[in-house]
Structure formats: structure tokens, C-alpha cells
């Protein structure tokens, strides 16, 4: 199971820009690396649980996903737009005072409406779920390996955000940073929604 193709695929899908990584960069910049760790763990463990359950129930999930996928896409993209707005507001002193990093549970739950996460999980299970052993053991092993590869890859984004923190102590710089993160998040949401709609036509 642990071969170069698998490591490469999971690493690339984990480290490339997407909703999770943009949120981690914003969180690292606003709250620091340490306070972003629950968010990171929520993503990686939520991803592992998603891989495990999809691995166990692939046929049923594939059949079900066809009917609910547009709903999941709209929910996921709506949530990303809401997060974009929250990131944008967090640049203001009032927003900064009430802002908090995403919790472990919220980050784990977000994976179920994150379009990029669904693409990654389905491809991982279809391409790399081992055959010829107990099904639940294969799914569990794949899930654990995914989490172990995913965590350091997404951690890079939180670390990059944290590395910029001393520059972000200047209110103007923080406003620009959060504005860029919010805009990228919103553009990601619109792109994912557009891509989903094109698939339906």
C-alpha cells in the first residue's frame, strides 16, 4: 500500500492550494501555529475518517453521492464564502477581538462538504485501497497512512502563515493579508461551484 505513487498522490493533493490550506494559512497568520494545531488535526483526522468510511462503503457512497453531490457542493461553497467574509472582517480591530481559530470538530466536519476533499478521498480509495485482505483492515490502514502523509503537508501552510505573523502586527499588513486570503477563498468557492455546475450540464 505504501508505495511511491500513493505517497506522491496524497502529498500533492494535500499540499496544493485548496480550501483547507487557505484556511490554515489565514489561521497561522492570525493566531499562530500552536493555536492552529487543533484545526490541522481536525483536517487530517477528519480526512482519515472520511477515507475509512468511503473505503468501507464505496459502492453505496458512489451511488448516493450522485444524487447529493450538487447539494454538498452548494453547502461547501456557501460555507467557504461565509469563511471568506469572516476572514475579511478579522482584519478589523473589532473582528480581531472576537475571532477564534477553527476547532478540531469544525475542521473535521468540514471535510464532508469540502469538494476538494471528496475528489481526493474518492480517488485515493479507488486507486489505492488494497485488495486481498480484510476489507475494514485495508480501509483502516489506508486511512491512517493518509492522515500521516496529510498532516505535515497541510502543516506547511499553517507554518507559512505563522512565519508572516511578525509582518502582520502592522494593521495595514494584516488587512492586506486577510484580504488576499479572503479573496482567494471566495474565488476557490466560485471555481468549485462553477466546476460542479459544468459537470451537471
Image (cartoon, helix red, strand yellow):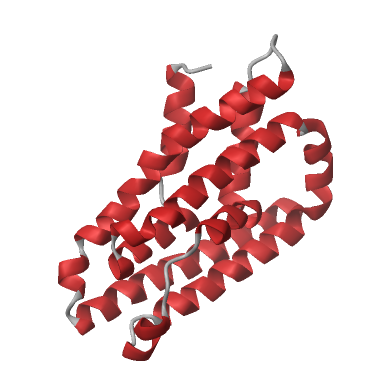
Quarter in which the N terminus is drawn = top right
The answer to whether residue 118 is left or right of residue 167 is: right
> Which residue is most to the top?
132
Q: Position of residue 81 (x, y in %)?
A: 55, 72
Tell me: residue 47, above or below residue 59.
below
The foreground one among 197 and 35 is 35
The foreground one among 76 and 42 is 42
Q: Position of residue 131 (x, y in %)?
A: 68, 13
> Which residue is most to the bottom?
94
Residue at horizontal 83 percent and vertical 45 percent from the top: 64
Q: Position of residue 126 (x, y in %)?
A: 66, 27
Q: Position of residue 194 (x, y in %)?
A: 62, 61
Tell me: residue 2, above or below residue 122.
above
Residue at horizontal 20 percent and vertical 58 percent from the top: 163
The answer to whether residue 160 is left or right of residue 118 is: left
Tell me: residue 96, above or below residue 7.
below
Residue at horizontal 65 percent and vertical 56 percent from the top: 113
Quarter in which the C terminus is drawn = bottom right
Amino acid at each position: 500500500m505504501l508505495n511511491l505513487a500513493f505517497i506522491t498522490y496524497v502529498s500533492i493533493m494535500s499540499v496544493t492550494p485548496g480550501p483547507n490550506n487557505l484556511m490554515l494559512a489565514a489561521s497561522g497568520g492570525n493566531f499562530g501555529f500552536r493555536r492552529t494545531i487543533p484545526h490541522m488535526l481536525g483536517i487530517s483526522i477528519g480526512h482519515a475518517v472520511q477515507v475509512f468510511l468511503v473505503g468501507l462503503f464505496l459502492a453505496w457512497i458512489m451511488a448516493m453521492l450522485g444524487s447529493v453531490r450538487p447539494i454538498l457542493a452548494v453547502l461547501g461553497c456557501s460555507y467557504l464564502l461565509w469563511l471568506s467574509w469572516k476572514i475579511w472582517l478579522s482584519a478589523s480591530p473589532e473582528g480581531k477581538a472576537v475571532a477564534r481559530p477553527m476547532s478540531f470538530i469544525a475542521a473535521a466536519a468540514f471535510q464532508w462538504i469540502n469538494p476538494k476533499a471528496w475528489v481526493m478521498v474518492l480517488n485515493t480509495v479507488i486507486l489505492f485501497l488494497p485488495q486481498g485482505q480484510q476489507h475494514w483492515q485495508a480501509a483502516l490502514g489506508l486511512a491512517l497512512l493518509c492522515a500521516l502523509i496529510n498532516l505535515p503537508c497541510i502543516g506547511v501552510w499553517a507554518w507559512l502563515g505563522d512565519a508572516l505573523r511578525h509582518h502582520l502586527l502592522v494593521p495595514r499588513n494584516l488587512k492586506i493579508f486577510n484580504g488576499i486570503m479572503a479573496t482567494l477563498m471566495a474565488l476557490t468557492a466560485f471555481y468549485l461551484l462553477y466546476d460542479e455546475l459544468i459537470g451537471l450540464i
